[in-house]
Image (cartoon, rainbow, N blue to C red):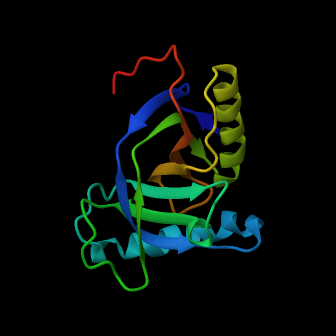
Amino acid sequence: MSILYEPIVKNVGEMKIVGFRVYCEDGDRYIDEIPKASLALDKRKQEICHLIHPVYQIGAFIIETAYIEEEGYWVGFAVHQFVEVPNDMAALTIPPQTYAALTVKGSNDQIRPAYQKLQQWMEQNNYPRLLHKWRVEKYTKWGRKENIEVELLDTTELNEGFHSNY
């Protein structure tokens, strides 16, 4: 795994994504099922109306869900608005949030260790993790689990000493 940047904190506006919801009762299956969904989505991105940036694939999930409808992992592309969402795809709106962010590249089995590094940085710098909010993964390389590039966005809130330029 390579860390491309040091962690930062940033505000991100509302995101609307269209794609697939991946749900696995056995949580260990996500590492295999998410890349499959990612490839299938990439092959069908021309079916999605109002794409913003087809070079970025977005993953989203909540750690501590309140409803069964929030369980799983969404993989999609950002859109300006929801219009004619394909029948077998899902639409998801992620509200504006503040994130601790870290960009990494390498094998997808290195995502968990990268999250651990990000979470340690958050703890050391007094940024609480908000487990009931959406986490986002913004991929610039995807589909092959041995070669990904992703910005990990772990939901937090601003601490008193932080001043944002975003």
Position above or below: 82 against 64: below
Residue 31 drawn at (x, y percent):
68, 63
Above or below 65: residue 84: below
**Image point 25% across, 64% down: which residue?**
81
Left or right placement of residue 83 versus residue 109 in this view: left
Q: In the image, what residue occupies the spot 65% across and 47% down?
A: 111
Q: Nearer the viewer, residue 35 or 27?
A: 27
Q: Residue furthest bottom?
A: 87
Count all numbered tags in the image, as a single digit: 0
x then y, percent, for residue 20: 48, 73
Furthest-top residue in this view: 161
Residue at left offset 47%, top offset 51%: 139
| Residue closer to the observer: 100 or 4 | 100
Q: Position of residue 105 (x, y in %)?
A: 56, 43
Q: Position of residue 5 (x, y in %)?
A: 52, 28
Q: Quadrant of the N terminus?
A: top right
Question: Which of 57 and 61 lies nearest the eye of the viewer?
Answer: 61
Placement of the C terminus among the 4 image quadrants: top left
**Residue 128, quarter of the rendered image:** top right
Relative side of 88 to 166, left or right? right
47 left or right, relative to 144: left
